[in-house]
Amino acid sequence: MMVMTSNMYRSILAKALTLPMDQLANVALAHKIHRDTLLLLLHDKIAHRIFKKFLASRMKDHFVVFVDEVDEFINLPGIEFMQHTAKKLFKKYLSEHAKLQVDMSTKMRQDIQAKLNTPSIDMFKSAIVKVKTGLLQDSLVRYLKSPIHSEMKQEFPDLVRNLMSAVDKGKVDLPQLESILSNPTYLTNFRKYLKTQHAAENLIFLEEVEEFRRLPSYEIVVRSAKKILDKYININTARSPIPIAAHLHDDMVENVDKAGKRYFSDAIQDVVSILRTTEVHDFLESPLFMVCVAPLKVYI
């Protein structure tokens, strides 16, 4: 084996640093990710392992592990199912050509449509408020005064009495609507009335959105997000918290129960910025980088 002097090493390193990225491992993948040095190091199987080893020597290998685990999180089946369900709800009730279209402003529809690829538990919140407001203003009082509602007197006499008292006082509001929506039997009776008014789509929309918000798969998403958050981000639980902006940290901790596909996006940007501006440059000047460069074999 040839013994390398310091001058020879510096010369080889200089040549290595001028090599195009497609000289590194997995040439096809290097082209697919547009020769971005950091992305190559993160996604190339061989380079990833060596880069992670380099970061371990600087007590920062958990930065790369965090990125890896977020990649897995983004591809969770639960998130894919949420996307499918959200798009189905939008097409059925909110799109311009929906057969069961509910009343909504154009801006509100566009805002919800923009979130379809990155769904979250509260993405339909504005639509829910709009539909409930519409029921309060247009349908609820007429329903409470209708013969169909009188069918509930025998089964729920106290609730009926309270609701009719609110009608008499002109104080029918959200609490009265929620008391109906939260009672399955009453809800069925209300739906029966709305069908006679050809307005049942509003109530059906609320029911299906509530099912969306309770998707079992979403619980898996939230648990996975919380696990990653506590392991790498949360300063109260992580062994070596990744340094992200303080306001971002606080926002993520506060809203983990609403985690969606883009929950870690800003944190990933912070981590990538740290790696790209400091660690990548030092790695490319380290002896470990030589392991990634195939042409160096000719010198040994």
Image (spheres, rainbow, N blue to C red):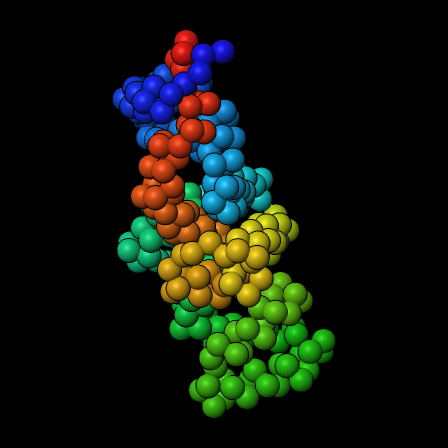
User: Closest to the observer: 11 or 209?
Assistant: 11
Spot occupied by residue 55 in the image (x, y as percentages of width and height): 47, 40
Q: Quadrant of the C terminus?
A: top left
Number of numbered markers: 0
Q: Residue at x 34, y 19 (%)?
A: 8
Q: Is residue 183 left or right of residue 81?
A: right
Spot occupied by residue 265 in the image (x, y as percentages of width and height): 41, 48
Spot occupied by residue 70 in the image (x, y as percentages of width and height): 50, 44
Farthest top residue?
A: 298
Spot occupied by residue 85 in the image (x, y as percentages of width and height): 52, 45
Is residue 70 among the parts visible in the rendering?
A: no
User: Closest to the observer: 95 or 99?
Assistant: 95
Is residue 170 among the parts visible in the rendering?
A: yes
Q: Residue at x 40, y 15 (%)?
A: 296
Q: Residue at x 65, y 73 (%)?
A: 151
- As displayed, is residue 259 above or below residue 52? below
- As displayed, is residue 209 above or below residue 129? above
Farthest right residue?
A: 155
Q: Residue at x 50, y 24 (%)?
A: 46
- As displayed, is residue 187 above or below residue 23? below
- As displayed, is residue 36 above or below residue 208? above
